[in-house]
Image (cartoon, rainbow, N blue to C red):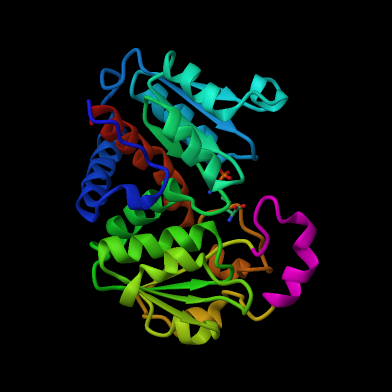
Amino acid sequence: MNLRHFVSLADLTGTEIRQIIQRAIELKDETRAGTHHDGILRGKALAMIFEKSSTRTRVSFEVGMQQLGGNALFLSPRDTQLGRGEPIEDTARVLSRMVDCVMIRTYEHEKVERFANYASVPVINGLTDREHPAQLLADLQTYFEHRGDIRGKRVAWIGDGNNMCNSYIHAARLLGFTLSAACPEGYDPDPEISAVAGPALELVRDPRQAAQEADLVVTDVWASMGQEDEKSARRQAFSGFFVDAELMRLARPEAVFMHCLPAHREEEVSTEVLEGPQSVVWDEAENRLHAQKALVEFLLAA
Ligand code: CP
Ligand code: NVA
């Protein structure tokens, strides 16, 4: 057994990401055709630690494990010893003796790294302040399904240089597309991640420049979980960073629009775009389920 974690999208190679996406598409098609996959992870258990709220991540991992024949356990700090100060290193070693895989959603990215260092089973990042790699697998799957391989394409990121943006930068480098990220001054993506992106990343200040000739336009909330106190300052800083029909017209006619959700209509995106013909957000949300089944299968087979 070769222990593999998925703390960052950069824990996988571009080839492995493409392999997982193809498998996700296959699992989705087969599931829709009525095939049962409950032999794949029979008897396997996934522990899910949530220190932040979630709808999609929780439901997709839980149902995904069920569809593969395994189990998922929801653990919140409110009713586990984690919330009473038991060290993450101890929790990692204890859970590793009982379950086959652990997913963590938390604030500090370093916490997931520390957990992974002490775990002897695969650890999956279900979102940290720095990255949201599981969402990227679903976004990429969605692009591949709608438009084919993303290699050589132009992706526009509009808004905060947040966890999603950081994971998009890794994706651009690993899969060979260009990410043009338009972020207001002071809200740039992680400098360490940007530093290794090379020509895959273009940092601009004008959303119109980023959207120009884009094949995919992506945005996210202006204030992420944990930034509730910054809401009004952020509302001012991001006022021009709005994805509306006018911005979408600068992109290529066949461009699609994505948002990891939850979305704030008329804040970062207009209702017209979110509900419009270029929006693929519901497929993107559904693909969390299939992409993560392919991910867990990949990690447990390693
Ligand atoms: N996109 C996403 O991760 O959604 P949840 O916060 O609902 O899990
Ligand atoms: N950037 C958002 C994504 C939510 C899925 C956040 O971290 O809250």
Residue 103 in picture, x, y percent from top left: 47, 33
Quadrant for the N terminus in the image: top left
Q: Quadrant of residue 238?
A: bottom right
Residue 135 in picture, x, y percent from top left: 45, 49
In the rendered image, residue 227 lying in the magenta stretch gets the answer yes
* Segment colored magenta: 222-238
> 209 left or right of 6?
right
Q: Nearer the viewer, residue 33 or 259?
A: 259
Residue 107 in picture, x, y percent from top left: 61, 45
Give the residue at x 33% y 60%.
143
| Residue 33 visible in rendering | no
Q: Nearer the viewer, residue 154 or 127?
A: 127
Quadrant for the C terminus in the image: top left
In the rendered image, residue 253 lying in the magenta stretch gets the answer no
Give the residue at x 66% y 60%.
264
| Residue 106 visible in rendering | yes
Q: Quadrant of residue 67?
A: top left
Residue 84 in picture, x, y percent from top left: 72, 23
Vertical placement of 3 versus 134: above or below?
above
Give the residue at x 80% y 67%.
232
Give the residue at x 51% y 86%.
208
Count of numbered marks: 0
Vertical placement of 265 versus 104: above or below?
below
